[in-house]
Amino acid sequence: MTTTTSPDERPWLVREVAALREQTTQLSAASVWSMSDRDVAEVAIELDQLVGQLNELKLRCLNQVARTDFPTAAGAVDVVAWWQRTTRRTSATARSDLRLAHSLDRDEPLAQAMAAGALLPDQATVIAKVTSDLGTAEVPPEVVSQARDYLLEESRNHDSRVLRRLGQRVLEYVAPDLADEHERRQIEAEEREALTRASFSMQDLGDGTWRGRFILPDLQAAMLRRAVEALSSKHREQGRRATEFQTRLGLAFCEYVETQSQSHTQAGLPATVVITTALADLQSGASCASLDTGERISPGQLRRLCCGAGLIPAVLGGASQPLDVGRERRLHTKAMRVALHVRDGGCTAQDCDLPVSRCQAHHDPSWSQGGNTNVKDARLLCWRHHRYAHDPHFEQRHQPGGKISFHRRA
């Protein structure tokens, strides 16, 4: 015998949501063209906030479903698979929804802001990750709460991308005494993770063109974008409308590839990216540095780039007085690199046989520690070992025969 529940006997929330959907169906027939510009804009803003409030309720319900056996009883492997199948989301989106649902359940002020329509889901995701990372880094709970409140306030004026950058340096605003060490650890971890995700692929479309996809860390992406944008000015005659800007960039990228394929020296990419740091920080390796594109890089990354790359380090002394804006003597000359090629024959790291074409000139000791730019105080290292040479997590040991080895510090 089958029992049915009348609409009036269903829980209050179920009835209200059903009524809201019915009202929304009626609203879909509304004519917005007859309204004034101000009224249409007001409705768009109100609807956006309403969607945010409904998102919070949806995620709260999803978190409750995750606590039950309902997904497996419905034939799904877990709650993610059930949510993916039921709502036709991708697996990645379903997992992201569940992570945010758990975060909102643990952080009441964050949930309240979203329930009030004052916080978008992507903003909430950024703030939740920042607070989670701070907690993992053993930052005191009261400081984590201050950081969360600061980002909630900033979310009124900034999108999720800006919030992410603010979150990277949030301790500078709420706990300056903890900021430098936390930022260094955070950025070093992000750089290591970004390198593991770096990828490049190309597909022949069969019509004389290829399609490519790549993932780059912030630094290399900034260098590539700066170089291509600089070259794009030569191709303005190829397109006069703003919609053809991508075509100009495509032609500039073609030129960039052609010039780089004919020049594989170890001086780095011809992209002018300014890195700003204090002299004391460069020498001590205690603090991160800023790119003129807004990104931050770790001390190890900065020291590696100082060995020779198409970047300009703006080294500042007291009162932000510029001490060095890319003095040429830090770069090995062409003659020096040829001598290094002949002498070293490839990467000088122990058990590495990469050829000279895949190596960079490295100051030993490093340029930031007073190393001289000459053949005697230089060696060839491949890109990977060059990173190790400037990574504080590795120590360098000289081996017989002029080789060096790298060991992760305990």
Image (tube, rainbow, N blue to C red):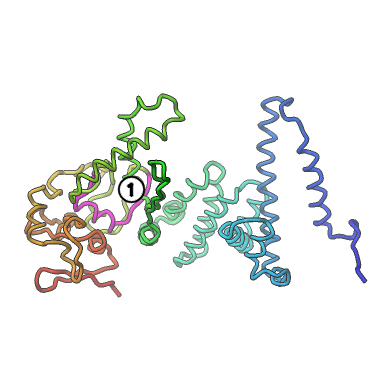
Indicate the quadrant containing the C terminus: top left, top right, bottom left or bottom right. bottom left
Q: Residue furthest front?
A: 206
Residue at 41%, 24% in the rendered image: 240
- Write the residue at 28% across / 56% down: 301
162 above or below 189? above
Q: The residue tagged with tag 1: helix, strand or loop? A: strand
- 294 lies left or right of 332: right
- Answer whether residue 191 is magenta in the image: no
Mark 1 belongs to which amino acid? Ser
Q: Position of residue 94 (x, y in %)?
A: 61, 59
Magenta-drawn stretch contains 314:
yes
Residue 389 pos. (x, y %) = 22, 63
Q: Give whichever of 283, 88 is nearer the camera.
A: 88
Which quadrant of the figure has residue 28?
top right
Location of residue 352 with respect to 179 vertically, above or below: below
Nearest to the observer: residue 90 or residue 348: 90
Q: Is residue 12 above or below residue 28?
A: below
Does residue 241 lie above or below 349 as drawn?
above
- Is residue 266 visible in this depiction of the protein? yes
Q: Is residue 314 visible?
A: no
| Viewer-nearest residue: 349 or 409 | 349
Q: Give the percent coordinates (x, y) of residue 238.
A: 37, 27
The answer to whether 196 appears left or right of 121 in the picture is: left
Q: What's the magenta region?
A: 294-317
The residue identified by callout 1 is: 290
Residue drawn at (59%, 59%) of the image: 100
